[in-house]
Amino acid sequence: MESKGAAQWSSIIVPSVQEMVKEKMITTVPPRYVRSDLDKTEITDGSGLNTEIPIIDMKRLCSSTAIAMDSEVEKLDFACKEWGFFQLVNHGIDPSFLEKTKAGIHGFFNLPMEEKKKLWQLSNEIEGFGQAFVISEDQKLDWADLFFLTVQPVESRKPHLFPKLPLHFRDTLETYSAEVQNVAKILVARMARALEIKPEEMLKLFDDVDSIQSMRMNYYPPCPQPDQVIGLTPHSDSVGLTILLQVNDVEGLQIKKDGKWVPVKPLPNAFIVNIGDVLEIVTNGTYRSIEHRGVVNSEKERLSIATFHNPGMYKEVGPAKSLVQRQKVAKFKRLTMEEYMDGLFSRELDGKAYLDALRI
Ligand SMILES: O=C(O)CCC(=O)C(=O)O
Ligand SMILES: [Fe+2]
């Protein structure tokens, strides 16, 4: 990561929304957060449309019986093609450990401000407490704070961040990182099986010593005018695979399905998994990275943790060659992850615009 490009990945430092809400009795939203540009409508259960994202059973994906495994792989394949999102159940991670992780994240955002300031983003970095993709002073802002950090490979951890986390929380994140990485590797291997991509082509990207795992913890404070703001701007994840955990029981994630915003209703202890832009590229557009957003609540705070899985910084990313041979046409350009990231962080977050720019 120590390249010329890496130094340029940054986001303008913005105020903490959590602090703003805590300190002042805010009754109206400051203009910089008002999003009259966004479509706030969402579809509801009575719409007649299918609003439930598919549910995938990890135990069946790992079954020693080929019939059980393949029928679940088929469901996974359908979910990735049609929805780009699914809920993962029976993932094998101990529910009491997940509760500990959630409590740790909650406590972390509630640390005293003087402690949090030590972990704040620097002006030339994207890691730490702060925001992402803020590239101009007059850009509208999300009603949220985040904490972003690279966890794997170990050498890419920032010396001023990971070692400075509260010890018990660091240990929890270390275990969470390993458990989630293992889930990601299995999912990617099953996707390769479904698409008949040579396993080594996928493993080289997501199960190698240089594969990157990062975490984005999101804190959405309550908002007096929730309809005026957005917690998280509509975006597709610019990564390979995202494994999302809802940290408390407040809903707010919505995904774009057939042009409409559909609320996701997380099952207890399930992960919400989604295909990112890098996997859309690798699968030559067969699997789709779907736009999603976060809305906020007038009374309750909302928290989530997204764990992102990406190929190593110097790996070349492009449509899998074994797939292109069969499909006869490559739909995306090939580029290194570093080139990809340079392009990503020089833009505002804008739906799937960056992925579109990489289309051939
Ligand atoms: O808060 C959520 O549920 C969604 C988070 C998300 O989409 C992200 O961090 O990329
Ligand atoms: Fe996301």
Image (cartoon, rainbow, N blue to C red):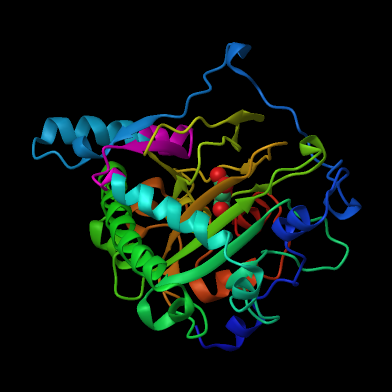
Report if residue 79 is visible in the image: yes
Q: Which residue is at a point 65% across and 22% down the rendered structure image?
A: 43
Q: Quadrant of residue 151?
A: bottom left
Report if residue 120 is visible in the image: no
Picture layout, residue 78 above or below residue 195? above
Quick one: quadrant of the C terminus?
bottom right
Front-lying residue, 14 or 77: 14
Boundaries of the magenta span: 78-95
Q: Is 218 covered by the magenta stretch?
A: no
Q: Quadrant of residue 155?
A: bottom left
Q: Is 94 covered by the magenta stretch?
A: yes
Q: Which residue is at a point 47% across and 85% down the rendered structure image?
A: 159
Picture layout, residue 71 above or below residue 197? above
Picture layout, residue 230 above or below residue 205? above
Residue 103 image offset from top left, x and y in percent: 44, 52
Residue 68 image offset from top left, x and y in percent: 16, 31
Front-lying residue, 213 or 167: 167
Residue 202 image offset from top left, x and y in percent: 31, 59
Q: Residue furthest left?
A: 65
Residue 205 image offset from top left, x and y in percent: 35, 65
Tell how many labels.
0
Q: Which residue is at a point 69% across and 64% down the rendered structure image?
A: 133
Q: Is residue 37 left or right of residue 279?
A: right
Picture layout, residue 52 above or below residue 160? above
